[in-house]
Structure formats: structure tokens, C-alpha cells
Image: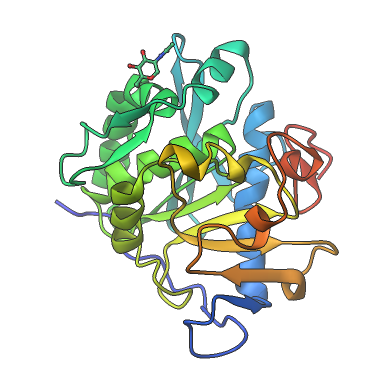
Amino acid sequence: MKPFSAIRAFGFSVAVGQCLAATTQGVSDNIYNRLVEMATISQAAYADLCNIPATMTTVKKIYNAHTDINGWVLRDDSRQEIVIVFRGTGSDTNLQLDTNYTLAPFDTLPQCVGCSVHGGYYLGWTSVQAEVESLAQQQANKYHDYALTVTGHSLGASIAAITAAQLSAIYDHVRLYTFGEPRTGNQAYGSYMNERFQAASPETTRYFRVTHANDGIPNLPPAEQGYVHSGVEYWSVEPQSPDSMFVCTGNEIQCCEAQGGQGVNDAHVTYFGMTSGACTW
Ligand SMILES: *[C@@H]1O[C@H](CO)[C@@H](O)[C@H](O)[C@H]1NC(C)=O
């Protein structure tokens, strides 16, 4: 059963036509506004969804006490969309997940052959899997024309990616927007994600991996430990505007990662001028 439908295309008019170039500058206003909206929700997830867009209603909270994974299922009737958002690191319990770089076989998704993912985040995912899948199913049953989107920042970004991988095996056209995402899995996982989310080109991708300036978290865990990125990178630099976004495909170390940041820094906690949980937007 594949009840969630394709979302209306958000006009993939990336400046500079015919794909394949590794880096292009500028995105359409539609894409920019969409990335800002998803960043708003992701940053609001650090503060119980403060100031999220008025079109969004909260369906249900996702929570596991053992891993302290926090998320929400939201619904936007104006856009006919279900959005699942995960909070980033908010506790020592979360930090223990962040620092567990052991690659874990992605056993909950056997379709992803040879895939391993970040061991800490895999524990996070499996702690909420039953709840997430059952909530998605409830929403799919009730709102079968709606699109399904997953988003989050930092730890929340990787949990979002693993969730989207899993849900994309059940539902068509799942969309994924991550902000300051750590490397989430091995090469087999990265290739699977790129294929599932049509991330070979910005014209087709449903996986928007948003980075900012020299955010140091996308450089972790190190590529030398068997980790890769996936999705199309949307690199945002100052001053924040559609014209100062770069769309980067094809290389492991480019755009944000090439700036050499390591770990949590100013660029990591602020996306599009919004700081995690600050609620000043
Ligand atoms: C790290 O992750 C692996 C794989 O998920 C898990 O087996 C192991 O127990 C975790 N280690 C700690 C200290 O939590």
C-alpha cells in the first residue's frame, strides 16, 4: 500500500541549466522558502515547536525515554502534507548517541543490501520505529492524498534520514530535508538513499541536505571511518538569500565540508538566521 501521493513539484529551477556540474549558485524563491520553512520547524523542535508556521497543526508527539528521541507528526492541510520532525541533541542521553560511531547493520531495512548506519542513531531510530510507523499509517489511512515529508537538524537530521529511508520502503515520494546532518551511513546506505530519493541531480532530488557556512557537524563522523553523505547538498552562506545558496552534487568533501569545520560551531546552531530553540523568528 502506497497511500501518500507526490507533493506538488516545488519548481526545481536551479540556476544554471543542465545538471552534472558539481556546484551551481542560486536557487529559486520557491525552493529557498521551502528550505527556510523546514529549517524553522527543525529549529523549533528544540523548544516544543515554538513559532511554527500557522498552517501546521500538531498531530502527535513521538518520544522515547530511554534514548530521549523527541519528534512530532504535523499536518498542513493548506498544502496537504504530513511532516515528521525530529529534535536535535538536547541531553547527555542524546550526546551518547551522537558519539557512538560504530556502524550498525541497517537490519530494520533489509531492502538496503549491505547497508550500515550510525550506531547511536540506529539505536535512536529503533527506539521510536514502532511509534513512527503506526502514526504514519494512521495519517496515511486518513489523508491518503497527502504528501509525506521528514525533517530535522543535527541528530534530528540523521534520525530524519533513517526514518525517511525506512518510510520510503512503504510510501512513494517521501521527501527529506536535513539541516546540519552528520554523516549517517556507509557507502551502500548512501547509494541506496541517492537512488530512492532520486538524488543524482537537483532536478529530481527529494533529499535536500542543507548545510551552512563552515558547519562542522557534516564533517563527522569522519569519512575515514567508512561514512559517506547522500542527497543533494544545499549549502547556505551569508548573506542569507536564494542567490547565496550553492547546490553541490557529486563529491564527498565539497561546499560546507570543504570549509574544514569540525564539530559544533556557530554555523551549526544557526540556519537561515534561526538558532536552535531560540524562537526569535
Ligand atoms: C553503539 O551502537 C551499537 C550499534 O547500534 C550498539 O550495539 C552499542 O550498544 C552502542 N554502544 C553504546 C555504548 O551505547
- The image quarter containing residue 280 is top right
Relative image position of residue 213 (x, y in whole percent): 75, 55
**Image height of 65 relative to 4, above or below:** above
Relative image position of residue 253 (x, y in whole percent): 57, 58
- Front position in the image: 178 or 146: 178
**Image height of 56 relative to 11, above or below:** above
- Front position in the image: 167 or 21: 21
Task: Tell me: 274 left or right of 159.
Answer: right
- Front position in the image: 208 or 52: 208
Residue extending farthest to the top is: 66
Task: Tell me: 5 left or right of 248.
Answer: left
Task: Tell me: 116 left or right of 180.
Answer: left
**Image height of 2 relative to 25, above or below:** above
Which residue appears at 69% of the width and 27% of the height?
Answer: 47
Q: Quadrant of the C terminus?
A: top right
Relative image position of residue 11 (x, y in whole percent): 52, 79
- The image quarter containing residue 173 is bottom left
Residue extending farthest to the front is: 224
Can residue 220 be seen here? yes
**Image height of 223 relative to 47, above or below:** below
Query: How has the structure been colored for display?
Result: rainbow
Which residue appears at 46% of the width and 27% of the height?
Answer: 101
Relative image position of residue 88 (x, y in whole percent): 59, 31
Which residue appears at 32% of the width and 24% of the height?
Answer: 126
Q: Ligand 1 sits in which quadrant?
A: top left
Can residue 36 be seen here? no
Number of numbered callouts drawn = 0
Which residue appears at 75% of the width and 76% of the height?
Answer: 243
Residue extending farthest to the bottom is: 17
